Amino acid sequence: MKVIACYSMKGGVGKTATSVNIAYWAARTGNRTLLIDLDPQGASSFYFKVSSVRKNWSKRFFDAYEHLVGQIKATEFMNLDIIPAQINFRKFDVMLSQLARRKTRLKKVLSGLDKEYDFIVLDCPPSIGHLAEAIFEASHAIFVPVIPSTLSERTFEQLHDFFTQNGYASKRIVPFFSMVQRQKNMHRNTMERLRRQYKRFLKVSIPFSTDVEKMGEFRGPLDTFAKSRPANKAYYALWKEMVPIIRRARYD
Ligand SMILES: Nc1ncnc2c1ncn2[C@@H]1O[C@H](COP(=O)(O)OP(=O)(O)OP(=O)(O)O)[C@@H](O)[C@H]1O
Ligand SMILES: [Mg+2]
């Protein structure tokens, strides 16, 4: 079982769009996949048309994997399950701050699902705190969508610095470009510069596309309503590029 995070401390960069589409492609290509919506906004739960039934179970989230098992829901897609978010997930940082072994708790509870799933995809909230650190520990690979603009570039560099300063292996961070508008000079130049600086940027990038925005209207991954469109093909290509990286990744 491999744990994949879609993470950035910056909001609105495409973490959820990526989580939903790569979880879909993971499942579609025959892998038993669990998407965990860690963001209290619950956007990926919304896209998969699920919500959690039991309120306030989140207090036990980090105690034992058995609590997670009870919250798993099937989606309409074969091989694809989800743990939907609830608003109380906003307390995760505070909860973790009060727990011993807070960094390794998430890794531990997820390891309980080892036999059930091939991939666990974490849709992460935009923050950097105890939850983010638990995510960094738990994830084999951390995919970071980067919009090729000055602010996103800065955020990516901050994340990279955070990793090196806190002793995390920066090779676990795998960035890729999101919401790319090739007609913009700034996007092209930023991409070129960042690719030169960080060799780990994926080759595939996700174009800016109104089809991605329509996921909210159709409530599903792109392949269900925009099959032949560039954004759908880009997410499939992204997934294919991710697979060998994920398979090779080990905790270190
Ligand atoms: N490639 C894209 N092209 C156009 N719009 C996009 C693209 N990717 C995402 N969006 C839109 O941008 C908004 C933010 O995307 P998304 O929710 O995936 O980002 P996020 O990083 O998960 O945000 P948050 O930090 O709030 O969780 C959404 O309205 C989404 O529809
Ligand atoms: Mg999101």
Image (spheres, helix red, strand yellow):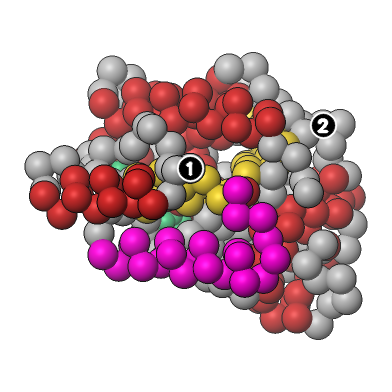
Q: Which mark is residue 116?
A: 2
Q: CA distance from mark 2 to mark 1?
A: 30 Å
Q: Earlier in the sequence, mark 2 or mark 1?
A: 2
Q: Which mark is residue 7?
A: none
- The amino acid type of the residue labelled 2 equals Glu
Task: Tell me which residue sits at (30%, 25%) in the image.
Answer: 226
Q: Is residue 196 left or right of residue 47?
A: left
Q: Is residue 173 above or below residue 237?
A: below
Q: Residues within 10 Å of mark 2 (few under 14, many from 20)?
A: few
Name the spot of residue 128 as percent of width and height, x first. 56, 72
Task: Tell me which residue sits at (43%, 64%) in the image.
Answer: 157
Q: Which mark is residue 200?
A: 1
Q: Secondary structure at mark 1?
A: loop
Name the spot of residue 124 as percent of width and height, x first. 56, 57
Task: Tell me which residue sits at (19%, 45%) in the image.
Answer: 188
**Does residue 77 appear anywhere in the picture?**
no
